[in-house]
Amino acid sequence: MAVPTMGVVVLDCPDTRRLADFYARMLGWKIDEARSDSSWTEVVDEEGRRRLAFQEAPGFVPPEWPSAEHSQQLHLDLDVPPSRIEEAEREVLGLGARLVQDDGDGARGFRVYADPAGHPFCLCLVDR
């Protein structure tokens, strides 16, 4: 049995509240005020089991997609049924994301976006 267990994924950013709000709205989660302060903000799902955190990083330099000079460090894959990809794209763009790579016809199964702080994430086509 493993000793450590997964806690929370943390993204560095210049404005924790702004980025937490973006992800909370996109995922339908909420900001957990009890676990947040001026330099750290967490969002949590309805059941309180999944969390994503945002840490203030002065001098933050966003990653670029794709780029060896400004590596992405990590990215999030978010599953979307193929029938709802256009709706999901409109939603994330409306929340402040920007499209950075589109495979056109969907043949590769994902589209890459950057969140408001520049972190890449993918909308992945997954049949559910």
Image: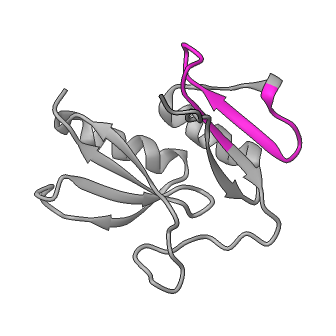
In the image, 3 versus 55, the foreground residue is 3
Q: Quadrant of residue 63?
A: bottom right
Residue at figure coordinates x 70%, y 46% from the top left? 54
84 horizontally vs 94: left or right: left
Task: Estimate the x, y position of residue 2 in percent, counting from the top left.
Answer: 51, 33
**Residue at 76% in and 60% down:** 14
Image quadrant assignment for residue 85: top left
Q: Residue at x 44, y 81 (%)?
A: 67
Q: Is residue 39 magenta?
A: yes
Looking at the rendering, which quadrant does residue 92 occupy?
top left
Q: Foreground: 54 or 19?
A: 54
Q: Which residues are magenta?
A: 35-53
- Give the left or right position of residue 74, taking residue 43 as reference: left
Q: Residue furthest right?
A: 38
**Placement of 49 over or under 100, stated as above or below:** above
Residue 95 inside the magenta-drawn segment: no
* Residue 47 sits above or below residue 14 on the image: above
Task: Locate residue 44, reporting x and y percent.
Answer: 61, 26
Q: Residue furthest top?
A: 47
Q: Residue at x 83, y 66 (%)?
A: 58
Residue closer to the observer: 71 or 96: 71
Location of the C terminus (image quadrant):
top left
